[in-house]
Amino acid sequence: MNRNRRIFIVVFVVFTTLVALLAIDMASRTTAPWNKKKQAVRAFKPDGTAIDSVATDTLLLPK
């Protein structure tokens, strides 16, 4: 195997690995289309008002 072919294979493997990791990261941060309705139900009360998620944050409370 000559030097150029070896460099090509290494670059190809590194590039493919980076693209796969990027795709996995993007997929883990998104919501599946069939779960969007459930997410909307959790975000809003049945009367249509938004739930204040900042009010329940314990990091913001004084000690």
Image (cartoon, helix red, strand yellow):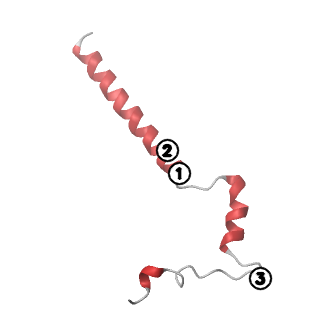
For residue 49, what is the image quadrant? bottom right
The residues bearing labels 3 and 2 have C-alpha atoms spaced at a distance of 36 Å
Q: Are marks 1 and 2 in contact (CB under 8 Å)?
A: yes
Characterize the local packing of mark 2: few (<14), some (14-19) or many (20 or more) Cα atoms within 10 angstroms: few
Report the residue at 63% width, 80% height from top. Answer: 51
Residue flagged by tag 1: what amino acid is it? Ser
Report the residue at 49% width, 80% height from top. Answer: 57
Please tell me whether mark 2 sits on a helix, a strand or a loop: helix
Asked whether 48 or 1 is in front, the reply is 48
Please tell me whether mark 1 sits on a helix, a strand or a loop: helix
Circle number at residue 24: 2
**Quadrant including the C terminus:** bottom left
Characterize the local packing of mark 1: few (<14), some (14-19) or many (20 or more) Cα atoms within 10 angstroms: few
Please tell me whether mark 3 sits on a helix, a strand or a loop: loop
**Quadrant including the N terminus:** top left
Circle number at residue 47: 3
Circle number at residue 28: 1
The residues bearing labels 1 and 3 have C-alpha atoms spaced at a distance of 30 Å
